[in-house]
Image (tube, rainbow, N blue to C red):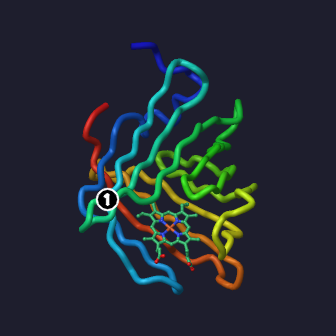
Amino acid sequence: AVDLNPAVLPLDWLLGTWESDEPGQGSFPTITPFHYNETLYFTHVGQPVINFMFNSFHAESKKPLHRESGFIRIQPGTNNVAFIIAQNSGLVEIEEGELNGQKLALQSRALARTSFAKKPYVQQISRVFQLRSDGRLEQTVFMALENQPLTQHLHITYRRTSC
Ligand code: HEM
């Protein structure tokens, strides 16, 4: 396997495959709460970039739901991390934020969507990834819609299933 590019070494704790250890919780003021499972893949090919793919499934029906994939970059010489993301819903986004140890807090800086995307439109996304001391990875996602302030949509923890 090719060596990890030193530019993304501060994010080496993300690498590998992660599976939800118990169903994640989805909620929002406008929807019925739900449970989901999700598998995350963080890989690299030696570029100063981490590649990722997140696939989620309904916890009971196992039906594929939300999917997103993209690239992670670090601004050289800083703790600034950028996620470049495409979502199956037709949304694309740039999120940026600071890496502090093994905690990454990101805010959307740019959002765009297909001309025929469903309403209500997302106005803002914010998320936190954290590697916990018990070795689990945690992701919390907040979003703001037209007429809905920034509110939690997702919370889930994962266990690493391969490196
Ligand atoms: C609903 C956005 C990730 C499952 C929604 C809605 C939006 C949205 C805008 C509609 C809310 C409304 O109608 O008022 C997003 C964004 C995500 C994301 C921006 C990522 C950043 C996920 C993930 C799952 C998920 C990972 C996992 C299963 C759902 C479900 C609904 C929903 C089940 C309710 C659908 C319905 O009742 O019609 N999401 N979502 N979402 N989302 Fe997400």
| Farthest-out residue, front | 116
Residue ID at (66%, 81%): 149
Quarter occupied by the N terminus: top left
Residue ID at (49%, 26%): 44
Residue ID at (51%, 74%): 152
Above-or-below relation of 39 to 26: above
Along the horizontal axis of the image, is 163 left or right of 12? Answer: left
Can residue 111 be seen? no
Residue 11 image point, x, y percent? 50, 36
Q: Within the image, what quadrant is residue 20 found in?
A: bottom left
Can residue 156 be seen? yes
Please, what is the three-letter code of the amino acid marked with disc 1?
Asn
Asked if ligand 1 lies within 8 A of label 1, the reply is no
Q: Residues within 10 Å of mark 1 (few under 14, many from 20)?
A: many
Along the horizontal axis of the image, is 66 left or right of 77? Answer: left
Above-or-below relation of 137 to 76: below
**Viewer-proximal residue among 51 and 68:** 68
Q: Within the image, what quadrant is residue 15 found in?
A: top left
Q: Secondary structure at mark 1?
A: strand
Quarter occupied by the C terminus: top left
Please tell me how many numbered marks the rendered image carries.
Answer: 1
Along the horizontal axis of the image, is 124 left or right of 28? Answer: right
Residue ID at (58%, 56%): 105
Residue marked by disc 1: 37
Above-or-below relation of 53 to 128: above
Above-or-below relation of 28 to 41: below
Residue 68 image point, x, y percent? 52, 49
Residue 18 image point, x, y percent? 33, 45
Residue 79 image point, x, y percent? 65, 41
